[in-house]
Image: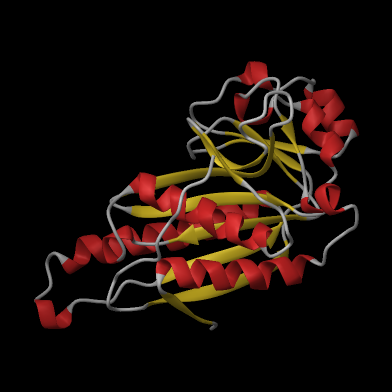
Amino acid sequence: MSSSIQSSQSVFSQEVELIDLGVKDFKSTWDFQDALFQQIIRTKIENRERPEDQQVLTKHHLIFVEHPAVITLGKNGSMSNLLVTQDILNQQKISFFKINRGGDITYHGPGQLVGYPIFDLDCFFTDIGKYLRYIEEAVIRTLSEYGIQAGRSVGETGVWIDADKPYRARKICAIGIRCSRWVTMHGFAFNINTDLSHFNFIIPCGIQQKAVTSLQQELGHPVPLDEVKHKLMHHFAELFNITYYRQ
């Protein structure tokens, strides 16, 4: 199920640092985004003690990365959704981490575009549901450029294809975030040329009897990751009313 989402009506465009890490392991990326996340929170707390004309502007970040194979379990997830032993994960060279985002269990790996928006939602809108819908909408609009009609599944965060058709519904993008003091971290995992067989090791997002898919599987051929990234960046910028810069 999809719905029409309007772009942010904020008068002022927010500047967002674009950080493309290329291929990087999950743990060091987690530590990196957590450091940015904590810095924004510290700045917000310190600004309360500063006169208005001395307050420090919030820095927002959008990280793109492609992880080596890893399975992550959210804080509300169940270990029963991991279907293989640690020995099998070791044999397959798949890492495993319990992490502090919402959501259940998911897989990251080569050919998947992972995005971590580290935004202070006080500068956008203080509505987590709206934030999640905007991320979904950016992916939905990107897929539309490839002729794929995607949408939402009622009660299930993420982007789906044929969500309203029993036994055909398949997820192409998973979303799991953390938010504290309206600052976000973690984000989304968009399957582009992903090896979908690794999802057989888990019950993805804890949702049984629904499949996962990728852009490659839907189109029948691989798609350059950078091509998708640039389309997705455009839709993020349009929806959130942001401009990018690089350090």
Q: Nearer the viewer, residue 95 or 238?
A: 238
Query: Closest to the observer: 7 or 43?
Result: 7
Q: Quadrant of residue 174?
A: top right
Residue at figure coordinates x 79%, y 21% from the top left: 84
Q: Residue 94, how many percent across, how many down?
A: 80, 38
In the picture, which quadrant includes the N terminus?
Answer: top right
Q: Indicate the quadrant where residue 21 lies.
A: bottom right
Q: Tell me: 171 left or right of 68.
A: left
Percent x, y for residue 139?
Answer: 60, 56
Q: Which x, y percent locates residue 22? A: 72, 67
- Name the residue rendered at 45%, 54% in the picture: 4
Is 135 placed above or below 170 here? below
Query: Looking at the image, is 5 positioned above or below residue 234?
Result: above
Identity of the residue furthest to the top in this view = 80
Q: Nearer the viewer, residue 121 or 230?
A: 230
The x, y position of residue 167, in whole percent, is 73, 24
Q: In this image, 16 relative to 50: left or right?
A: right
Q: From the viewer's perspective, is residue 112 above or below residue 71? A: below
Colour scheme shown: secondary structure
Say whether residue 25 is left or right of residue 195. left
- Residue sitting at 62 percent across and 24 percent down? 207
Q: Is residue 86 left or right of residue 145?
A: right
